[in-house]
Image: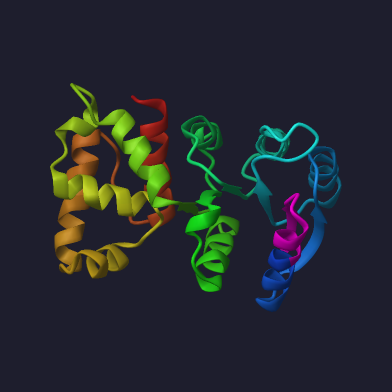
């Protein structure tokens, strides 16, 4: 699996390169600026891009904008964004095209190598890997007043948050210490209340929910 990595801090970039190589990834390019990232994504056609939001020269949102531009040119290009903070706008921009294969992780909340590597693989496979804090803010944005999420029970909101992180029914059941049958019932209720078609495909199911939250339909 070929990875383009963009991170301006040398020690972190070098550490990520070593980590990914140790888990069988091929590093197609490891760059430190927006222009270098744009060129690498255009020329190398990677399987997944791991991108810091803020890159030189301005340290604003070069990384994100390069990734979004690459996804416009190659719809569905898997992109895992790394950030210091939750930025709802960034998360919404990533989700806006509805094609999936996106992730948004907070750097200081990645606690072990397996967690990070699993997120890269999940995104590369077309799934999602969203930090719980990002999901909580997206949920909060859509849960007030007469918005559709206001129809969900507290338990259904909890299940929806875990679904949005990319977890399967089995994983959610383990997390909440209930049966898979109970989670399946909650999931069916969530889709019914949100007017979304039920699907057995976990990734498509999560992406549908995230797209719904993003567009606020």
Q: Is residue 5 magenta?
A: yes
Q: Which residue is drawn at 21% across and 43% down?
A: 190
Q: In the rendering, at what x and y percent does residue 172 appear?
A: 27, 63
Residue 21 visible in the picture: yes
Q: Give the quadrant of the N terminus.
A: bottom right
Tell me how many marks there are: 0
Does residue 198 lie above or below 116 as drawn? above
Q: In the rendering, at what x and y percent does residue 46 appear?
A: 75, 54
Q: In the rendering, at what x and y percent does residue 47 appear?
A: 70, 57
Q: Give the quadrant of the C terminus.
A: top left
Q: In the rendering, at what x and y percent does residue 93 appear?
A: 54, 31
Give the side of residue 14 with respect to residue 210, left or right.
right
Magenta region: 1-14
Image quadrant assignment for residue 2: bottom right
Q: Does the magenta stretch include residue 115?
A: no
Q: Residue at x 24, y 31 (%)?
A: 143
Give the side of residue 25 with respect to residue 82, left or right.
right
Give the side of residue 150 with respect to residue 123, left or right.
left
Q: Which residue is drawn at 65% across and 76% down?
A: 23
How is the protein colored in the picture? rainbow
Image quadrant assignment for residue 202: bottom left
Residue 1 visible in the picture: no
Q: Residue at x 24, y 34 (%)?
A: 194
In-front residue for pair 121/55: 55
Q: Which residue lies furthest to the top in this view?
A: 146
In-front residue for pair 73/67: 67
């Amino acid at each position: 699996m070929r990875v383009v990595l963009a991170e301006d801090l040398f020690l972190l970039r070098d550490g990520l390169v070593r980590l990914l190589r140790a888990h069988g990834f091929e590093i197609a390019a490891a760059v430190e600026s927006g222009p270098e990232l744009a060129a690498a994504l255009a020329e190398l056609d990677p399987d997944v891009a791991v991108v810091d939001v803020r890159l030189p020269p301005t340290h604003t949102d070069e990384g994100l904008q390069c990734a979004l531009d690459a996804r416009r040119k190659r719809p569905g290009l898997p992109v895992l964004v790394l950030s210091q903070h939750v930025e709802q706008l960034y998360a919404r921009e990533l989700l806006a095209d509805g094609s999936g294969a996106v992730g948004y992780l907070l750097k200081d909340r990645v606690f072990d190598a397996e967690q990070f590597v699993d997120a890269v693989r999940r995104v590369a496979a077309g799934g999602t890997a969203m930090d719980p804090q990002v999901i909580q803010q997206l949920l909060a944005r859509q849960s007030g007043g007469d918005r559709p999420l206001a129809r969900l029970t507290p338990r259904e909101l909890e299940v929806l948050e875990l679904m949005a992180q990319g977890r399967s029914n089995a994983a959610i059941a383990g997390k909440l210490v209930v049966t898979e049958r109970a989670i399946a019932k909650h999931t069916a209720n969530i889709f019914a209340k949100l007017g979304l078609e039920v699907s057995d495909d976990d990734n498509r199911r999560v992406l549908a929910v995230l797209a719904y939250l993003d567009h606020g339909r």
